[in-house]
Image (cartoon, grey):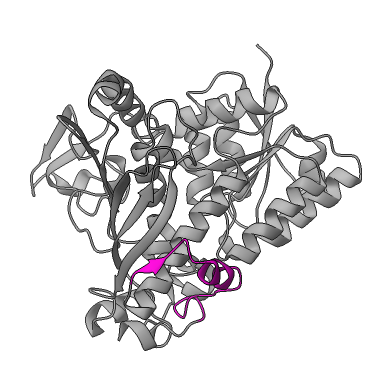
């Protein structure tokens, strides 16, 4: 089997999560990392776990010279700058087979178009990393229900939620750096997977046409004085000055261009889900059939008493974003595979070695960015947004949500 040599830009939470998933992937090695923080730690992890002879490089150019594909796992606000450096490295002779960008592709449509143009300039195949579409539970459910879909008709309603107690790093909480709050951070997941679930069997991933979106954003927990102070003390982000939403919900209507049938995607996301930890919930309902995925249902449960709790060093050893280390804990034996990271990496490896885009490319990532931004526009205007309106589509090209501008108090307070 041919091996793909990967280089990571960024060594934070997602870089480490992807590196851990890479332990389950054949034909791919982590050979280099460039990051402002924690690069040495990630390189040591890679070597200790047999992921490759991972070296720390002083800049993007040197990293690109020594790998086959580069993954941008750095914060949203530096994406364009980093991809520009990758393109310059290619022009200088780096022989890359592809470039990866973690979700979301961009904070605005303008940024997304810039990133796509840069990748095309360098003639690089692209992979947009949206792990939830690659979840085995989702793919198996759709495969199991394919005969029912063909007999009874496609799925008509999809519901998707991702919720936890809040991000790990300060820049996620800062709407001017991240591009918003939970709608930007996690709504992109839920919108993408719901659109995917609604797509009829055998049709392209962008087959269904977005018709309209109605969304709400709110600041339900982290704007209260007590929790606002906790956030300021812990993350250095002041939601009295630059608040972002910690809750969002909405409905997107899609049209089947062949039949005219309208279908609905309902999404809900929050940074105030204080239960066992991260929860992913997906449902698909069609005529006479349905499926449900709930990531908090596990074959493994662990109970830890108060007396024994002092021995537990890390609550997240049980589950991502876990907030407790005692009581009845949900433990996922293989989170990386459950969430789709392993299949996502497999798909990227095969695509890049074949000289083509991954199943999800940057053009698809831009479509998700458009829908997220349309959700912010709907929430700001408190009305349903017509996505078929040429004037709306033009407005979205230059639109920056008030929350992302640091003016969230105008719509959240």
Q: Which stretch appears magenta?
A: 384-405
Question: Residue drawn 8% across and 49% down?
Answer: 306
Of 276 and 157, which appears nearest the observer? 157
Foreground residue among 99 and 411: 411
In the image, residue 238 sits, relative to residue 248, either above or below, namely below
- Image location of residue 281, percent across then percent down: 24, 44
Residue 394 lies in magenta, yes or no? yes
Which residue is situated farthest in the right direction here? 92
Q: Is residue 167 visible?
A: no
Taking the spot 74% from the left edge, 53% from the top edge, the residue there is 117
Query: Which quarter of the image is occupied by the N terminus?
Result: top right
Q: Give the left or right position of residue 48, taking residue 306 as reference.
A: right
Work out whether residue 247 or residue 223 is closer to the camera in this orientation and state it.
247
Q: Residue 164 lies in what quarter of the image?
A: bottom left
Residue 265 in the image, given as x and y percentages of width and height: 30, 50
Tell me how many marks there are. Answer: 0
Residue 165 horizontal side relative to residue 50, left or right? left
Residue 375 picture quarter: bottom left
Q: Quadrant of residue 231?
A: bottom left
Horizontal and vertical percent position of residue 78 = 65, 63
Q: Is residue 41 magenta?
A: no
Residue at 69% across, 29% down: 356
Residue 171 in view of the camera: yes
The image shows residue 50, relative to residue 65, as above or below, that is above
Q: Residue furthest top?
A: 1
């Amino acid at each position: 089997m041919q091996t793909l040599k990967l280089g990571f830009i960024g060594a934070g939470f997602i870089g480490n999560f992807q590196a851990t998933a890479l332990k389950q992937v054949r034909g791919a090695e982590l050979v280099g990392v460039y990051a402002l923080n924690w690069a040495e730690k990630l390189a040591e992890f890679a070597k200790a776990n047999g992921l490759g002879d991972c070296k720390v490089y002083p800049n993007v150019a040197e990293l690109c010279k020594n790998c086959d594909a580069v993954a941008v796992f750095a914060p949203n606000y530096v994406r364009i700058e980093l991809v520009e450096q990758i393109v310059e490295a290619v022009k200088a002779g780096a022989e890359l087979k592809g470039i990866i960008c973690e979700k979301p592709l961009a904070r605005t449509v303008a940024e997304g178009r810039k990133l796509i143009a840069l990748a095309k300039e360098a003639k690089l195949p692209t992979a947009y990393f949206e792990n939830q579409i690659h979840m085995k539970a989702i793919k198996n459910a759709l495969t199991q229900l394919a005969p029912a879909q063909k007999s009874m008709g496609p799925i008509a309603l999809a519901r998707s939620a991702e919720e936890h107690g809040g991000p790990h790093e300060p820049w996620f909480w800062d709407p001017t750096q991240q591009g918003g709050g939970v709608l930007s951070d996690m709504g992109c997941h839920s919108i993408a997977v719901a659109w995917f679930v609604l797509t009829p069997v055998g049709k392209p991933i962008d087959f269904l046409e977005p018709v309209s979106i109605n969304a709400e954003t709110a600041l339900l927990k982290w704007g209260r004085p007590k929790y606002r102070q906790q956030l300021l003390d812990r993350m250095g982000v002041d939601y009295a000055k630059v608040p972002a939403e910690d809750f969002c919900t909405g409905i997107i209507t899609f049209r089947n261009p062949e039949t005219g049938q309208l279908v609905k995607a309902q999404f809900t996301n929050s940074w105030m889900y204080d239960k066992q930890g991260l929860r992913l919930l997906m449902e698909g309902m069609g005529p006479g059939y349905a499926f449900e995925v709930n990531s908090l249902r596990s074959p493994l449960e662990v109970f830890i008493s108060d007396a024994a709790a002092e021995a537990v060093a890390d609550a997240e050893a049980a589950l991502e974003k876990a907030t407790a280390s005692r009581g009845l804990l949900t433990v996922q034996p293989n989170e990386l595979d459950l969430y789709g990271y392993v299949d996502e990496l497999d798909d990227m490896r095969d695509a890049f070695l074949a000289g083509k885009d991954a199943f999800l490319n940057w053009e698809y990532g831009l479509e998700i960015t458009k829908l997220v931004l349309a959700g912010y526009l709907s929430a700001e205007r408190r009305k349903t947004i017509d996505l078929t309106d040429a004037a709306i589509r033009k407005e979205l090209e230059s639109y920056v949500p008030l929350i992302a501008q640091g003016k969230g108090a105008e719509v959240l307070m």
